[in-house]
Structures are given as C-alpha cells and as structure tokens.
Image (cartoon, rainbow, N blue to C red):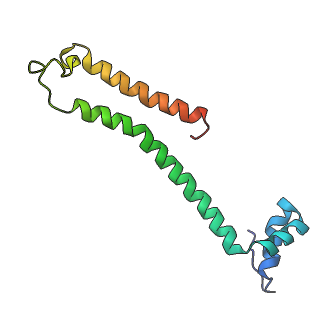
Amino acid sequence: MRTYHSASGSSAEDLFIELFSDTFGAEKASYLYSQYPFSDIYQNIMSNKMNDIIRILTIISTILMPLTFIAGLYGMNFNVSDSPWNMPELHHPYGYPITLLLMLAIALGMIWFFKKKDWL
C-alpha cells in the first residue's frame, strides 16, 4: 500500500507533483500547483459534486410535478349530475386506466427528453 507522506517530510508541492505528474507531467503539475491552491481545487470538486446532486433532484422534481397535478385534479370530488362541465371521464368505464396510462406516458416522455438532452 502506498502512502503519500514520508519521514523526510516532503512538502505539499512535492506531494501534488507526485500525484498529478502521471496525468499532466511534472512541469505542468508544478505550474498547476503554483496557480491553484489545494483549497480552491477541493472547493471546485465539492461544487461539481453538489451541482450533480442538485441536477438529479431537479430532474426528479420536474418529472413528478405534472403527475402530482393530475393526481390532485382527479382527487377532487366532482358530481357530474350537477354540471356538464365536471369531468365526464369519471363515469367512463376506462377512465381510470386511461388516466394511469396518460401519467405513465408523461413520465416516460420526460425521461426520454432528459436522456435525449443528455441531462440524465
């Protein structure tokens, strides 16, 4: 197992160059260390991870929003005999399965759209 500290007390710059010289080369790693302190690099990595989490949560919320609206709309109490403007599909024999299929189609359509845009 490799350790990144030694008894000789290598500096943080030596450690940085050792870790990133394979990727960038020793000269480029030394230049990167002089330009960007460790704390800034760490903050950027954490910021990118947080952005990925927020992006996923936003996509989930966006998919569930229209489904919640439809479920709330059909969850209200309607009396078709009182007004012709109430939902006639409530008494349709296939009203419930059609509504479920509509909700499934909306969710799958949004997932397809997000994958097509490479957001998911």
**To which quarter of the image does residue 1 belong?**
bottom right
The structure residue drawn at horizontal position 42% and vertical position 44%, both measured from the top left corner, is 61
Which residue sits at x=60%, y=35%? 117
Query: Where does the image place residue 60, in percent across and percent down from the top left?
Result: 45, 43
Instruction: Find residue 57 and report its horizontal and vertical position in percent.
Output: 47, 49
Instruction: Judge from the rendering whether residue 110 lies leftward or rightward of residue 92; answer left or right.
Output: right
Q: In the displayed structure, would residue 53 be above or below residue 104?
A: below
Q: Position of residue 68 (x, y in %)?
A: 32, 37
**Residue found at x 77% / y 79%:** 12
Task: Give the mark count.
Answer: 0
Screen quadrant of the C terminus: top right
At horizontal 21% and vertical 33% (from top left) the residue drawn is 75
User: What is the x, y in percent for residue 97?
Assistant: 30, 19
Left/right of residue 43 with respect to residue 73 in the rendered view = right
Compared to residue 71, the image places residue 105 above or below, namely above
Q: Is residue 28 above or below residue 55?
A: below
Residue situated in front as seen by the camera: 62 or 15: 62
Residue lying furthest left: 82
Judging depth in this view, the residue of 75 and 16 nearest the camera is 75
Quarter of the image where one finds residue 107: top left
Image vertical order of residue 95 relative to residue 20, above or below: above
Q: Residue furthest top?
A: 93
Left or right? Give the position of 5 relative to 114. Answer: right
Along the line of sight, which residue is nearer the eye, 120 or 117?
Answer: 117
In the rendered image, the residue lying farthest to the right is: 27
